[in-house]
Amino acid sequence: MKIRQNVRHWASKQALTMPVVGDIVEDRLVEMHTDIFLDRAAESEREARRDHLDDFFDATMDTYVAALDASYPEADAREITHIQANFDFYNHGWTEMMEFPADELGDHYDRYEDFFETHSISVDDPLGNFRPADGIATAPSTPEKLEEPEHPYAEGGFADDVYVEGPDGEVRVGGSDEPADIDPTEVLDIDPDEKTGEESGTAD
């Protein structure tokens, strides 16, 4: 699929594994992803999906770190979490939120089959072993949309690799090299003394 990558993505990667700051960044990333995808849904359906998406994206932060620990590049690790989300959207019939067409689900699974099998992730079980012990919030499904799915935000034709759009607008296969000497607290405008949950913000 096609994703973006800039210095804020690299800063977020570093920050997620830092004490205190990691919790702050995780909260921001969860909030950001929930808001982005809810904007794609009908206004009347957004709040009913919010808690589910918050819980889901919170769990995928663990997936992201696990993929990095397994030596996947940053772009691939992040793409894995987006594929998980699209599995979940498909299962709920939320086709309007999907980033790639439903007929590419199998292709995206196959590219990361080793990782997905290791962590019991499938189209039917997008979180696999990353599902929290106490579960995640439920949300109403719209299965009727799967009969003739519409994907207004999906971009097809990028199922064979991870395509990365850089800050210059160029789209390349794979990601860029991690910049040296990043200070995540400066890039992401974080006060290390900030208490988790007391400030909202986004990291693109």
Image (cartoon, rainbow, N blue to C red):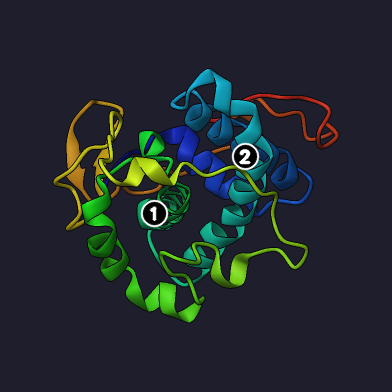
Label 1 CA crowd tier, 10 Å (few <14, some 14–19, many 20+): many
Residue at the image position 20 percent from the left and 54 percent from the top: 159
Label 2 CA crowd tier, 10 Å (few <14, some 14–19, many 20+): many
Amino acid identity at mark 2: Val
Mark toward the start of the polypeptide (2 vs 1): 2
The answer to whether marks 2 and 1 mark residues whose Cβ atoms lie closer than 8 Å is no
Residue 164 is situated, as x and y percent measured from the top left of the image, at: 26, 42
Q: In the figure, 93 relative to 159: above or below?
A: above
- Give the CA distance from mark 2 to mark 1: 16 Å
Residue 91 is situated, as x and y percent measured from the top left of the image, at: 45, 54
Residue 24 visible to an observer of this rendering: yes
Q: In the figure, 136 relative to 157: above or below?
A: below
Residue 1 is situated, as x and y percent measured from the top left of the image, at: 26, 47
- Which residue has dot 2 on it? 30
Secondary structure type for disc 1: helix
Amino acid identity at mark 1: Ile
Q: Nearer the viewer, residue 102 or 14?
A: 102
Name the side, left or right, on which 13 lies relative to 172: right
Residue 202 is situated, as x and y percent measured from the top left of the image, at: 59, 27
Kindly indicate the quadrant of the structure image that contains residue 32.
top right
Q: Nearer the viewer, residue 45 or 13?
A: 45
- Which residue has dot 1 on it? 83
Residue 174 visible to an observer of this rendering: no
In the displayed image of the protein, which residue is found farthest to the top? 43
Q: In the figure, 75 relative to 124: above or below?
A: above
